[in-house]
Image (cartoon, rainbow, N blue to C red):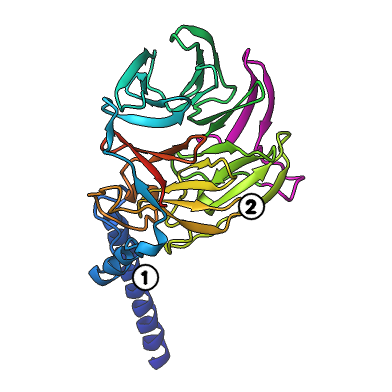
Amino acid sequence: MTCKTGKTNTGLVAGIVIAVAIILSIVSVVRYDTTGEKGSGLSAEYQYDISEYAKIPPEMILYQQVGNAIPTGLKASRSIAYKEGIYVSGDTKVVKIDGAGKIEKEIALESAPTCLAVDDGGVVIVGSNDTITILDKTGTKRTQFVVPQKNAILSSIVLNEGLLLCADAANGLIYRYDLQGELVNIIGEKDPQKEDHTGFVIPSPYFDIAMASDGLLRVVDPGRHVIVAFTLDGHREWTWGKASPRVDGFSGCCNPVNMAILPDGSFVTAEKGLVRVKVYDAEGQFVGVVAGPDQLEWQGPLQVCDTPEQCQSRGFDVAVDETGRIYVLDTVKNVVRIFEKKQ
């Protein structure tokens, strides 16, 4: 009798434990914030500690802003390039800003741009989701073609010796074309036979590329917080970068969002969440800061984003010129800030 009663009580307790566990699981799922609108859920003390990472020591800031911020005249700016003037894409057009900070010309587009490049002759190449459009300097369309993958989001374009490289953030691929729209090869395809590359981790629509003077393509792998060097036939050479909220690392779920390469081979990087623009040397060693939240007049929350949804603000873009000046596109205020090295 005692044994039977004991078995019954054990089963009852086990049933209650399982029921409570199920109820707690349901509550946790219901309360889970998939949008990030409720914040990170961390304590105020932890949030304060995070904000400390944004307080950059003055001696680390190696650049200063030149003049005032330049309005782009756009409501939703997206990307920036520099070729004898500042080019900014957004809305459904590209604007060129002259040296005095005035809009010199506008080029109308058929749809909203997602990335931009300009060659030495003023030819403008625009990506718009899955479509690439090549326009001459007057804005007349030369060529237009669609990339091979469905649901593409073109996020970066690079010109290199008559070839065009386009990064697709949705599919984690880089397409290499000639200027007539003929596909040459694809970089970044997953290959189970190759141990050196298993694809990119791209949690948000930021996937940037740049061509270095050593002939290797640099690719941001934002989910892994590294920049990767590739040959143009797709062989992975090396990586640099690390995940850290400290000033010498890349924070959150997916940083850096954009980059540019200075004339001396150094890298300029831009981050979202902890909004900051920094410089690394050609080997990937941290050099210093171009601008932090204060210099960028950032007014939103500062946080390390564990998920892309926690950082709803748009990522800033960067460009450089032949003198080493750095151009930062603030895609929230839709202005361009110019920075030069302190003397």
Kindly identify the residue that appears in the image at 43 percent across and 27 percent down.
Answer: 114
Q: Is residue 38 left or right of residue 11?
A: left
Label drawn at residue 239: 2
- Residue 164: x and y in percent read 61, 24
**Callout 1 crowding tier (Cα within 10 Å): few <14, some 14–19, many ≥20:** few
- Residue 141: x and y in percent read 48, 8
Q: Is residue 290 on the magenta stretch?
A: no
Q: Is residue 149 left or right of residue 327?
A: right
Element marked by disc 2: strand
Q: Is residue 177 left or right of residue 226?
A: right
Label drawn at residue 326: none
Locate the N terminus and report the quarter of the image it occupies. Answer: bottom left
Give the residue pinned by disc 1.
18
Q: What kind of secondary structure does the magenta stretch mostly adopt?
A: loop
- Looking at the rendering, the stretch of residues picked out in magenta corresponds to 169-197
Q: Is residue 185 on the magenta stretch?
A: yes
